Amino acid sequence: MVTRDSGRELEFLDYWERLALYAELNGLHKHPAYAIGLAAVKAGFPIRHDEMEGFDFFDDRIEKVRIKNGQSEPAAKQKYFATQENIERRYRSLPHKVMDKIMQPLCHHYHTVRLQVTTSLTDSDFYHH
């Protein structure tokens, strides 16, 4: 959690923005939290590896490894797996599926080109060298 801290929070947000855009330009989409962590360290925030009370974090890939290693109980996380399955595998009619197949690469290309142009205009040396 980031709070007001004599301007370091603004520095953190600036680093986070730059690192997230850099990662996006270079195809690093899999783990967006790396940009957040690196920005926090760069801004001088202390990093803690504890859990927030009342906040149950769930990542299916992490939970599968925890279950495999005996660190987590499968029954306790079953409702999260079921909810994620419903979100990811929701029913889509055939016309919707066809439109998704057509639009997805077009949207990806549009966003990639827009990102390249925007970063070239703002800070070309950082993003493209």
Image (cartoon, rainbow, N blue to C red):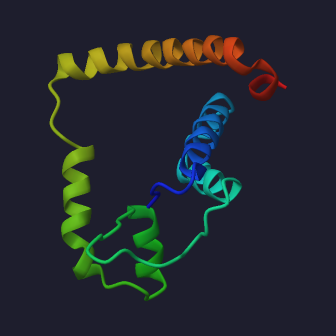
Is 114 or 63 nearer to us in this picture?
A: 114
Q: Residue 58: horizontal and vertical position, in percent? A: 35, 65
Asked if 3 appears above or below 124 in the picture, the reply is: below
Asked if 16 appears above or below 60 in the picture, the reply is: above
Q: What quarter of the picture does the C terminus occupy?
A: top right
Residue at 43% across, 87% down: 71
Residue that lies at the very extreme toward the front in this rendered image: 6
Residue that lies at the very extreme toward the bottom in this rendered image: 70
Residue that lies at the very extreme toward the right in this rendered image: 129
Q: Residue 125: horizontal and vertical position, in percent? A: 82, 23
Residue at 49% across, 85% down: 69
Question: How many numbered circles are shown?
Answer: 0
Q: Residue 14: horizontal and vertical position, in percent? A: 60, 38
Residue at 73% across, 21% down: 123
Asked if 89 appears above or below 45 in the picture, the reply is: above
Q: Residue 128: horizontal and vertical position, in percent? A: 79, 23
Is 88 or 7 nearer to us in this picture?
A: 7
Is 2 or 7 nearer to us in this picture?
A: 7
Q: What quarter of the picture does the N terminus occupy?
A: bottom left
Asked if 72 appears above or below 28 in the picture, the reply is: below
Residue at 47% across, 57% down: 2
In this rendering, position of residue 115 left or right of residue 90: right
In this rendering, position of residue 125 left or right of residue 116: right
Is 5 or 36 nearer to us in this picture?
A: 5
